[in-house]
Amino acid sequence: MEFCRSLLLFCLLVPLARGQEATRMYEKVFPAPSEVVALDVERGLLEVVNRPAGTEVKISIRFSLQDGEKARPDPADEKLIRERTERLERVAGRAFDHLKPRFQADARRVGLVLRDSRWVVYDRDPALQVVISVKVEMPAGTALQVRTVAAGVSVGDFDGSVDLEGDSGSFFFKRVRGDVRAKTRGGSITLADVSGRVDLKTVNGNIFAGTLNGPSTLETSNGSIEVQRFRDRLKMAGKDAALLVGLCAPLPPGLELSTSAGIVTLQIDRTLPFTIDASTLLLGKVRSRGLEPLVRRGGFNESALVADFNGGGERVRVRTGGATVELIGREPLDG
């Protein structure tokens, strides 16, 4: 059975504003059906978009090897231009062969593996720059798996589950109708809207979420987490991290926020009925403005507070190791 329909390959050497550029491009198409698309892309820029359900998987790759010299040679200096051109030509062939992608496919899975580009720069010529761009078009309903070292990943309007893992790359999700799991050690994670379960973790990076519609767990160290709106159980945990979350009706049960050191801010619709259970250690205080609660235990500008707002309701639990907890009233959001 033949799973790959086509492969296009070509190489160009073109002038750049600062020098020259050698490029090589691949395009490969895999017929349906495919249940999983697995991408191992160590560096570069990765874009993933949906095609209609039941259609093909299309992978397009562009490698660019650029002359990294800051100064462009004088057009009259033919010798220098020739030397830099010959240097780029010598390295380009070996570099592109080293970076040549490996495709794997069967009736259920399409896979791509791209090797690390550091060999080209660090071992061959530090004056050269490597740019890798990958675009994957895959059928709606197909699961996506990505493993990367330092690639930036962008997932557009997407129907299917997503599982991303990287060392230092940043991830962006526009709208995902499915579950999302993402983990990066040195990058940020941004989501606009996710319908399913969400599990995010980053170190030395930030997490920003627009709307979370399913049960969600968000964790960071030495960064920050911001959630504008959530519609199911939410747990936010930080280590030396600031947390910010918006509260509006209907407020789902099970909101928990904890951080070892970092300000926790709740932006709350003034008419929302809920109960706050907040405490902080050391010199931290619980503060409020724009809200009128009924205090049950502790008090404002103290280290602990249990209070009902608008008659009380779902309990919001906040714990911090020594920073301020801010409760800020706002005009109710629409919808």
Image (tube, rainbow, N blue to C red):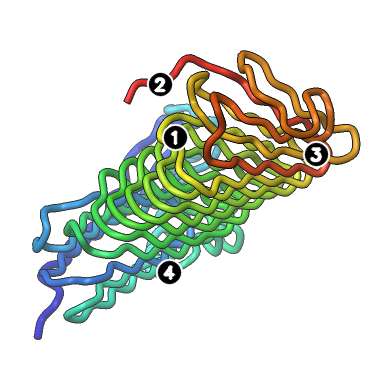
Q: CA distance from mark 4 to mark 1?
A: 46 Å
Three-letter residue code for mark 2: Leu
Q: Are marks 4 and 1 in contact (CB under 8 Å)?
A: no
Residue farthest along the bottom direction in this orientation: 1
Residue 98 has which mark? 4
Of the residues under marks 2 and 4, which one precedes in the sequence?
A: 4
Residue placed under numbered mark 1 in the picture: 229
Of 192 and 3, which appears nearest the observer?
192
| Spatial separation of the CA atoms under disc 2 and disc 4 | 54 Å
Mark closer to the observer (4, 3):
3
- Amino acid at dot 1: Arg
Between disc 1 and disc 3, the foreground one is 3
Question: For the residues marked 2 and 3, what is the alpha-carbon distance in whole angstroms?
Answer: 29 Å
Distance from label 4 to label 3 (Cα)? 54 Å
Mark 1 vs mark 3, CA separation in Å: 24 Å
Instruction: Classify residue 278 by image quadrant.
Output: top right
Q: Residue at x 80, y 39 (%)?
A: 280
Compare marks 2 and 3 and give the one earlier in the sequence: 3
In the rendered image, which residue does mark 2 sit on?
Answer: 333
Q: Are marks 4 and 3 in contact (CB under 8 Å)?
A: no
Which tag, 4 or 1, sits closer to the chain's start? 4
Q: Which mark is residue 185?
A: none
Horizontal and vertical percent for residue 233?
Answer: 48, 50
Q: Is residue 221 left or right of residue 249?
A: right
Instruction: Answer with left or right where residue 59 lies relative to residue 254.
Output: left
